[in-house]
């Protein structure tokens, strides 16, 4: 029987590339995002090219209880999920005090609350059937504080720590939890977050979303715990372990600076 993957944030970027990878391997899909037009065209494309069944769910996952609503909708049409990919997320570049609360409320809700709630709902559901695999998209932002994107960096640190802990709890349950940590990647993210103005983006090699998705997909299928994309991106998380935290924050602030 064909397996089914649920991918949040599948309309663009890394999520869209992941949808192609699952479909290419004959997996049916449940795709979630807010943009109906983009999801619908992806559905047609994948069904024609790979002969899989694709269900689309147009949802704002930053809304409270959106995870439960999505779970209920899937159950109502008898869709069991074997692979859960928590990819939807966004950041916002700017000082903490000057950014509106509404932005952070939505960011925490999407990047943290909905991701956690979906894991909770689907792990309980998969546990009765097994096996299952979960892929949570974090970031290289997870490894240090990020002045000018303080909430986003902290949200990705949550995703990494949460995923590692839950993965450990599930080690005997035949359910794996993999965390993908991309560095700067060519998607809509840079524009949505306003991060393109930072020195980080100006001075680092930007990865292709297809390459990042492939790495995450393979790691999830092998049941790996963490995977970081790109040699340059692996260096900082390694070195940081040996430096005083104050230094790390100072260097991070320099990298995140957007002054000319
Ligand atoms: N690109 C990078 O440099 C980078 C680096 C590290 C980590 N990441 C992480 O990678 C993940 C994917 O981002 P990306 O780079 O592919 O960015 P992207 O091109 O902006 O795609 C984000 C996806 O999330 C969906 N999304 C955003 N807000 C949503 C909401 N409220 N409800 C439902 N879906 C929502 C978007 O669809 P709609 O707009 O249609 O809703 C879109 O499909 C994110 O978690 C991001 O934090 C990205």
Image (cartoon, rainbow, N blue to C red):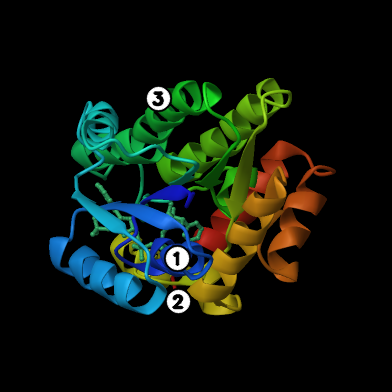
Mark nearer the viewer, 1 or 2: 1
Which residue is the site of mark 2? 260
Residue lying furthest front in this view?
1
Q: Is residue 98 visible?
A: yes
Residue appearing at x 38%, y 66% in the figure: 16
The alpha-carbon separation of the residues under discs 2 and 3 comes to: 46 Å
Q: Quadrant of the C terminus?
A: bottom left
Mark 1, Cα crowd under 10 Å, few <14 / some 14-19 / many 20+, is many
Q: Which residue is mark 1?
A: 23
Residue wearing tag 3: 121
In the picture as drawn, the residue positioned furthest to the right comes out as 242
Side of 96 relative to 36 (left or right): right
Q: Earlier in the sequence, mark 1 or mark 2?
A: 1
Looking at the image, residue 106 lies above or below residue 56: above
- Residue at 49% across, 49% down: 1
Residue 165 occupies quadrant = top right
Mark pair 3, 1: CA separation: 24 Å
Query: Is label 1 in a helix, a strand or a loop?
Result: helix
Report if the beta carbon of the residue with label 2 is closer than 8 angstroms to ligand 1.
Answer: no
Of tags 3 and 1, the one toward the viewer is 1
């Amino acid at each position: 029987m064909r397996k089914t993957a649920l991918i949040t944030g599948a309309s663009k970027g890394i999520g869209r590339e992941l949808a192609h990878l699952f479909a290419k391997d004959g997996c049916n899909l449940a795709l979630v995002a807010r943009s109906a037009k983009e999801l619908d065209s992806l559905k047609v494309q994948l069904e024609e090219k790979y002969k899989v069944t694709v269900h689309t769910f147009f949802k704002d996952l930053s809304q409270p209880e959106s995870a439960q609503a999505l779970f209920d909708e899937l159950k109502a049409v008898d869709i069991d999920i074997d692979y859960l990919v928590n990819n939807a997320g966004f950041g916002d570049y700017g000082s903490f005090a000057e950014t509106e609360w509404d932005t952070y409320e939505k960011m925490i809700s999407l990047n943290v609350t909905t991701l956690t709630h979906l894991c909770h709902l689907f792990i309980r559901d998969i546990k009765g059937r097994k096996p299952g695999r979960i892929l949570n998209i974090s970031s290289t932002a997870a490894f240090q504080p990020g002045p000018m994107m303080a909430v986003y960096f902290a949200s990705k640190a949550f995703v990494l720590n949460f995923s590692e802990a839950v993965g450990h709890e599930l080690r005997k349950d035949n359910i794996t939890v993999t965390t993908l940590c991309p560095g700067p990647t060519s998607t809509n993210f840079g524009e949505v977050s306003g991060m393109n103005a930072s020195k980080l983006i100006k001075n680092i090699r930007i990865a292709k979303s297809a390459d990042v998705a492939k790495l995450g997909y393979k790691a999830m299928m092998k049941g790996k715990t963490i995977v970081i994309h790109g040699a340059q991106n692996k260096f900082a998380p390694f070195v940081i372990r040996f430096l005083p935290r104050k230094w790390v924050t100072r260097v991070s602030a320099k990298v995140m600076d957007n002054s000319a």
